[in-house]
Image: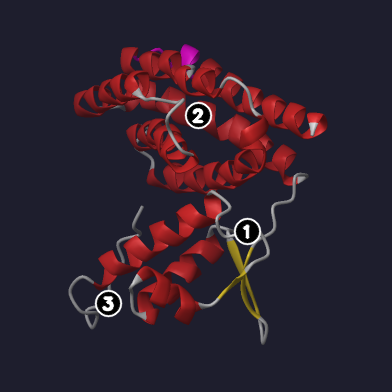
Amino acid sequence: MSYGFQSPAEPAGHSSLAEVAYEAIRDRLLTLDIRPGDPLNDEALARKLGFGRTPVREALKRLEVDRLVVTYPRRGTFATKVDITDLAYISEIRAQLEPLAASRAARVATPAMRAELAQVMKDVEAFDVAGAGVVEMLHCDARVHRGIYRAAGNPHLEDTLIRYDNLATRIWCLVIDQLPGLAGHLHEHFDLLQAVIDGDEALAADLARSHVNGFEVAVRSALFAA
């Protein structure tokens, strides 16, 4: 999501380049293609992505706010480490905010947003889990969550949930090869999306809470089995 700020002195397309750079680096961080603790050199990233250094630097600033990178004076910028002890903290916050977003979306979503969520349901149903890579799977999962966050109509809640969902995704990617039933993980979104579309606030909240709790249990089980 773009924050939408652009200086009058910035050239046309500047913000969009920063947005593309942000999304490209973010996806590499989320999927652990950039490993936790790896150094991030803005010049090297700019060459790899085919951008100038300015949009990459702006992307790194946003990613630091997202807690996906950290900058140390005189040392440089690094991908943040994935500490599994953070799972409980992240889940504690998401268990409160995900139901809030789902119930609010069920209450205030516009007809256009409900139609968009119905299309997301169809796309998830048609998604080929067995043939998909990690990035495609994460994008499919993210479409569900981002759609509900957006439908809730509260940009502050949306921004907060996106950040915590990203942090949870990095933990998920640590154990994704050990998680059974990924098709079930994606398809359990059906009932949640339907509850939001139908305007059933209580059911939407309950299903969102159950999803967060189930995620934590599945990750912990995979870690203990490793």
- Magenta span: 199-205
Judge from the rendering whether residue 108 lies leftward or rightward of residue 177; answer left or right: left
Residue 105 falls within the magenta-colored stretch: no
Amino acid, disc 1 = Arg
| First reached walking from the N terminus: tag 2 or tag 1 | 1
Residue 15 in the image: state x and y as whole percent: 28, 68
Badge 1 crowding class, 10 Å Cα cut-off, few under 14, some 14 to 19, many 20 or more, is: some
Contact (CB < 8 A) between labels 3 and 1?
no
Q: Report the front residue among 212 and 36.
A: 36
Determine the CA span between mark 3 and mark 2: 34 Å
Q: Report the front residue among 99 and 33.
A: 33
| First reached walking from the N terminus: tag 3 or tag 1 | 3
Residue at image position (69%, 31%) is 219
Q: Which residue is mark 2?
A: 100
Q: Report the front residue among 155 and 94.
A: 94
Determine the CA span between mark 3 and mark 1: 33 Å
Q: Residue furthest front?
A: 131
Which labelled disc corresponds to residue 7?
3
Contact (CB < 8 A) between labels 2 and 1?
no
Residue 202 falls within the magenta-colored stretch: yes
Judge from the rendering whether residue 12 lies leftward or rightward of residue 166; answer left or right: left
